[in-house]
Image (tube, grey):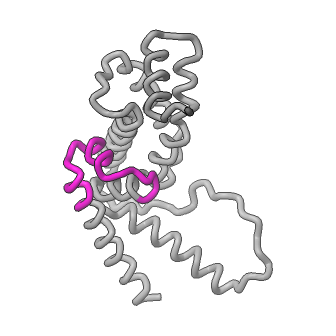
Amino acid sequence: MPSSPDTEESRLLERVKKGEPGAFESLITTYQESVFNSIYHILQNVPDIDDIAQEVFIRIYRSIGSFRGDSALSTWIYRITVNCCKDRIAHMQKERTESLVIMSEEGEKPREIPDHTADPQKVYSEKEFAAYLKSAIRSLPENYRIALTLREFEDLPYEEIGKVLNTTPNASKNLVYRAKMKLKELLDTFFKTA
């Protein structure tokens, strides 16, 4: 019978806590994609995503010995990731000047192979919508954005989202619902003006 993910997670945690060679590297390999995806979706295309992910794994390394196992290891790692994102948001807000900062959509652009058969107006509309959607998600209150990200992009159940956000599963479900309603309201505005 194949071992369950919880059993594999427990074994990995045990190996890391014992300080076995290569164990922490295995933990990084196992969770780095989830950490990077969470950071990207919560913060929306931050140029220093690698630095934030590194900070997540440094915090994990420093505190793994005190992990009590009250939740799944993956939930604990999500919690650390969310806290690092919150720290980054606070840092970005602190750096803001009195003037309004308009974030550029330039950033790093994914490399795309152009589709020469596509209708240019349609391509423009899709890119415009994608940019508006990113902006709309970014404009959501922090707790809405995090709950929505964990549910829709990371596919976490409400119970785990509640643990990550230190709230109940019903409260996390409510946060996701409110985030979706606010996002719908913002998108309705886009379509009315489009």
Residue 41 on the magenta segment: no
Residue drawn at (35%, 51%) of the image: 157
Residue range of the region highlighted in magenta in the rendering: 152-174
Q: Main secondary structure of the magenta part?
A: helix
- Observer able to see residue 66: yes
Residue closer to the observer: 174 or 56: 174
- Rendered image quadrant of residue 141: bottom left
Q: Where does the image place residue 2, in percent across and percent down from the top left?
A: 56, 33
- Rendered image quadrant of residue 74: top left
Residue drawn at (39%, 31%) of the image: 73
Image quarter where the N terminus lies is top right
Q: 24 left or right of 136?
A: right
- Observer able to see residue 48: no
Count of picture labels: 0
Q: Where does the image place residue 131, in percent across and percent down from the top left?
A: 51, 69
* Residue at the outermost front position: 1
Residue closer to the observer: 60 or 84: 60
Residue closer to the observer: 29 or 125: 29
Q: Where does the image place residue 26, in percent across and percent down from the top left?
A: 57, 25
Residue drawn at (40%, 89%) of the image: 192
Whether residue 130 is situated above or below residue 149 in the rendered picture: below
